[in-house]
Amino acid sequence: MPGRRTPLDADPSDGKARSSVTLSELGDLGDFLGGVGVIVTLAYLAIQIRRNTQEVRSASLDAVAASHMEFQRSVWGDPVLTKLWFDGMSGRVALPADEGRRFLFMVITCARHWERAYHKARGGTLESTSWSGIHQELAGVFAFPGTHEYWKRIQYMFPSDFVDFAEKAIRGIKDAERAA
């Protein structure tokens, strides 16, 4: 019954109740302890989510960096591919048909790498500082006359938002070079 007091701890030797609380007071105590438990749980979850976000970003950067380094190793590790890459980028050398196709696939691979990093950055899984370095490097590569010529041939393969973004970045590099 509400308001009725019940002894919690009676001492049989003196016949007096040491303390008594109402059922309502016990309910309030339970509510309070439950609230504390919810707050502790939410704090724990917030810490875990933050930790998970950091791990996802780290894994994302590792994946982008590994892909980029693999591409670079394949090009720089082979003198023939290194020469083809620089000849193709410069646009000063007319590439024979078989080398032109090989360079085209190199440009596609590089563009896919840039696109993947772009989407990871937009999705928040690639830190802005990491993205900035990758973006500037790749925009610089695609600003070279030969690479840009091949880029124009493959733009249809990519989402329009990425193409617009890449073109703006390439124009920015070219404008900065003209101004210097």
Image (spheres, rainbow, N blue to C red):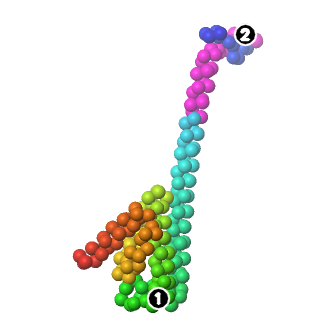
- Which range of residues does the magenta coloring cover? 12-37
Residue 137 in view, yes or no: no
Indicate the secondary structure of the residue bearing disc 1: helix
**Kind of residue indicated by mark 2:** Asp
**Kind of residue indicated by mark 1:** Ala
**Disc 1 and disc 2: Cα gap in Å?**
108 Å
Q: Position of residue 43 (x, y in %)?
A: 54, 42
Q: Residues within 10 Å of mark 2 (few under 14, many from 20)?
A: few
Above or below — where is 45 with respect to 77? above
Residue 7 appears in which quarter of the rendering? top right
Indicate the secondary structure of the residue bearing disc 2: loop
The residue that disc 2 covers is: 14
Q: Residue at x 40, y 63 (%)?
A: 160
Q: Position of residue 57 (x, y in %)?
A: 51, 59
The residue that disc 1 covers is: 97
Q: Nearer the viewer, residue 103 or 129?
A: 103
Q: Residue furthest right?
A: 12
Residue 27 appears in which quarter of the rendering? top right
The nearer-to-camera label among 1 and 2 is 1
Q: Residue at x 40, y 62 (%)?
A: 161
Residue 80 in view, yes or no: yes
Q: Residues within 10 Å of mark 1 (few under 14, many from 20)?
A: few
User: Which numbered tag is attached to residue 79?
Assistant: none
Q: Residue at x 25, y 77 (%)?
A: 178
How many numbered discs?
2
Q: Magenta stretch containing residue 98, yes or no?
A: no
Q: Position of residue 20 (x, y in %)?
A: 65, 14
Viewport quadrant of the N terminus: top right
Q: Position of residue 147 (x, y in %)?
A: 40, 79
